[in-house]
Amino acid sequence: MGGNGTFAAGNIVKYRWETVATIDGVKVLEPMSGGHKLPEEAHSSRMYILQHPQNGNFAQLRIYDKWHRLRFEVGYHREPRLDKSGRPVLHYHVYTYPRGSAVFDRTEARKATTKMWNKLGKYMKGVIFP
């Protein structure tokens, strides 16, 4: 399903994720050999979802641009900078690519907004949003 630093550059490599379901047309991926995050590049989709293997609840959603590069990520896990209690917190990161660079910069975690929840919440099984 996705690759790390390869597909957008035109290099085809062995798949490392498999599609295990879809939610409202968005592929739910599962790593084929361990791992706990989604690919940094997309082969065919503009969005992918990752669920916790133990319970099927939402873990991560990534959105990619027309060049298959990661642009936006929503996660639901502990984020001590945002919530010292140790409970999962719905948060996001924005990814940018400095001019001419294939390497991305990622923003610090920020708490998800109500607007994000209203738009993306349908993909987030098991998430508690204030």
Image (tube, grey):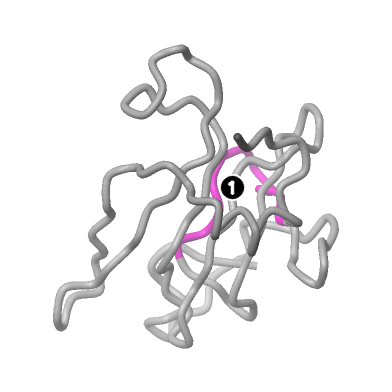
Would residue 48 be found to the left or right of residue 111 on screen? Answer: right
Residue ID at (31%, 26%): 81
Question: Where in the figure is residue 85, as x and y percent of width and height?
Answer: 46, 12
Which image quadrant for residue 29?
bottom right
Q: Give the residue number, with chain letter if any, for mark 1.
A: 60
Pick whichever, 6 or 96, lies toward us. 96
Would residue 104 be found to the left or right of residue 41 on screen? Answer: left
Numbered circles on residues, count: 1
Question: Where in the figure is residue 46, as x and y percent of width and height?
Answer: 59, 76
Whether residue 55 is in magenta: the answer is: no
* Residue lying farthest to the top in this orientation: 85
Residue ID at (81%, 29%): 55
SS type, badge 1 = strand
Q: Amino acid at mark 1?
A: Gln
Residue ID at (75%, 37%): 57
Question: Where in the figure is residue 31, as x and y percent of width and height?
Answer: 66, 48
Would residue 47 be found to the left or right of residue 12 on screen? Answer: right
Question: Where in the figure is residue 58, as x and y percent of width and height?
Answer: 69, 42
For the stretch drawn in magenta, what is the main secondary structure?
loop
Q: Judge whether 86 appears above or below 29 on screen.
A: above
Q: Which residues are magenta?
A: 29-40
Whether residue 32 is in magenta: the answer is: yes
Would residue 7 be found to the left or right of residue 46 on screen? Answer: left
Pick whichever, 10 or 130, lies toward us. 130
Q: Judge whether 130 appears above or below 13 on screen.
A: above
Which image quadrant for residue 120?
bottom right
Residue ID at (23%, 59%): 105
Q: Judge whether 56 appears above or below 44 on screen.
A: above
Quarter of the image with the C terminus is: top right
Quarter of the image with the N terminus is: bottom right
Other residues around mark 1 within 10 Å, as few (<14) / some (14–19) / many (≥20): many
Q: Judge whether 56 appears above or below 73 on screen.
A: above
